[in-house]
Image (cartoon, rainbow, N blue to C red):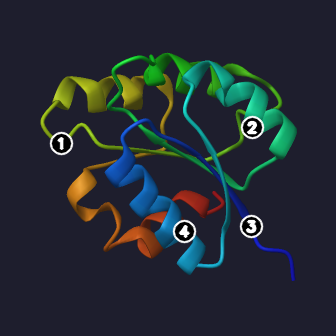
Amino acid sequence: MTQPLALVLYERLIPGSQLVNRLRDLNYRVLTIAEAEKLVESATAAKPLLVLTDVVSTGNDVCAAIGRLKQNPATRHLPVIAFGGDKSPELQAAARDAGADLIIGETGLLSHLPQFLDQALQVE
């Protein structure tokens, strides 16, 4: 059986690498990228099951990248889980406005990841 692929965009080492390791523990293959401008291109080429993005970034406009992903006909169907921004409700609101399906604080992300994945992957 083929393992599902998760595309993870992150810049910050600690939450990003912990998330990647947790996804692998849950039997996901993981493709990581660090540049938000490559999100649509990477998602189109790799065809992941879902996308996880760290909205906290010093050099990337992650929310704009989420918006481009959701506007692209080839990638708009992908569930997007945005995480981080615990201390920035404005950043979380921007991710929601851009089209993120779930916005999660960094603190509960790893401990509740299986539930968040199930929620993001529910077919409506």
Kindly identify which numbered label has been placed on residue 23: 4
Numbered disc 4: secondary structure: helix
Numbered disc 3: secondary structure: loop
Picture residue at 42% right of the left edge, 69% below the top: 113
Assess disc 1: are there few (<14), some (14-19) or many (≥20) residues with their C-alpha within 10 Å of its C-alpha.
some
> What type is the residue that disc 4 sits on?
Leu
Using the numbered discs, state the Cα–Cα distance from disc 3 to disc 1 in whole angstroms: 28 Å
Q: Earlier in the sequence, mark 2 or mark 3?
A: 3
| Residue at which label 2 appears | 43
Assess disc 3: are there few (<14), some (14-19) or many (≥20) residues with their C-alpha within 10 Å of its C-alpha.
some
Picture residue at 34% right of the left edge, 53% below the top: 15
Q: Earlier in the sequence, mark 2 or mark 1?
A: 2
Q: Is residue 10 left or right of residue 70?
A: left
Q: Earlier in the sequence, mark 4 or mark 1?
A: 4
Q: Position of residue 52 (x, y in %)?
A: 52, 47
Numbered disc 2: secondary structure: helix
